Amino acid sequence: MQDVTRLRRLSRLMQGIVLVCGALIALAVALFFFASLNDAAFFEEQVREKLDLSGPLVFTSSAVAITAALIAIQLGLLFAALYSVWRMFGAFSAEEPLSGESAHWMGRASTAFVALAAGGILLRMLMILALTMGNPPGEKMLTLGFGSSELLTLLIACIMYMTGRLMAVAADVRAEQRDFV
C-alpha cells in the first residue's frame, strides 16, 4: 500500500512538473511572438538559427505567415503531447493507478509524440521551402532531415505505446480478478 501512496505522490509531482514546463514553453512562445512583432530582424535571426540556414532567404509576408502557421502547428502538437502526459499522470494518481484510463492517456501521449517527431521533420522541410520560394531559380531549397532528437522522440513514443498496451492488458486482468473474487 505504501508503494501505491508513493506512486500517487510522484504522479502528482510529475503532473505539476509537466504543468510548469508547459507554462514555461507558453511564456517563451509569447515572448518570441512579441519580440518578433517589434523586430522583424529578430524573427529572421531566430528562424535562421533554428533551421540552421545561412543561404539566401526571402522573408516575404506570405513566407513569414506560412512559417508562423507551421510553428503554430508544431506548438499545437507539443501542447497536445504535454496535455496527454499531464492526464496520464493524473490517472496514475487516481484511486486505481492500474486502470484503462491511465493506459488510454499513455497511448494518446505516445501518439502525440509520434506526431510531434513526424511534424518536426515535415514542418521544418515546409518552412525551408516556404522561405526559399522567393529565391531566384537555382537557390530554392528543399531539405529533409532526420536526427537523433527525432529518433529519440520516436523511441520514447514506441516505449510509451507498448507500456500503455501492457497496462491496458494488466488493467483488464485486474478487473477480471476483482470480478472473480
Image: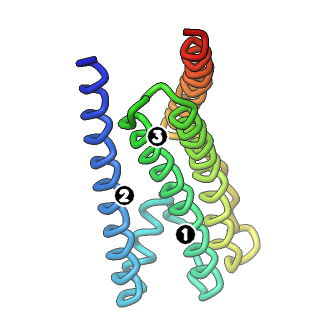
- Residue 72: which numbered mark, if any? 1
Query: Is residue 24 among what the camera can see?
Result: yes
Query: Left or right of 92: which side holds 117?
Result: right
Examine the rendered structure and indicate whether residue 158 appears above or below residue 84.
above
Q: Residue at x 40, y 34 (%)?
A: 92
| Mark 1 element type | helix
The residue at the far front in this view is: 181
Residue designated by label 2: 22
Q: Residues within 10 Å of mark 3 (few under 14, many from 20)?
A: many
Which mark's residue is nearer the viewer, 3 or 1? 3
Q: Position of residue 112 (x, y in %)?
A: 58, 46
| Mark 2 element type | helix
Residue designated by label 3: 88
Q: Nearer the viewer, residue 81 or 100?
A: 100
Query: Is residue 154 among what the camera can see?
Result: no
Q: Quadrant of residue 167?
A: top right
Query: Left or right of 144: which side holds 149?
Result: left
Q: Position of residue 98 (x, y in %)?
A: 47, 25
Whichever of labels 3 and 1 marks the residue nearer the N terminus, that label is 1
Q: Quadrant of residue 41?
A: bottom left
Q: Quadrant of the C terminus?
A: top right
Specify the amino acid type for callout 2: Gly
Q: Residues within 10 Å of mark 1 (few under 14, many from 20)?
A: few
| Mark 3 element type | helix
Specify the amino acid type for callout 3: Met
Q: Residue at x 32, y 76 (%)?
A: 31
CB atoms of marks 3 and 1 within 8 Å:
no
Examine the rendered structure and indicate whether residue 54 appears above or below residue 175.
below
Q: Quadrant of the N terminus?
A: top left
Examine the rendered structure and indicate whether residue 84 appears above or below residue 130.
above
Q: Position of residue 71 (x, y in %)?
A: 54, 67
CA distance for labels 2 and 3: 15 Å
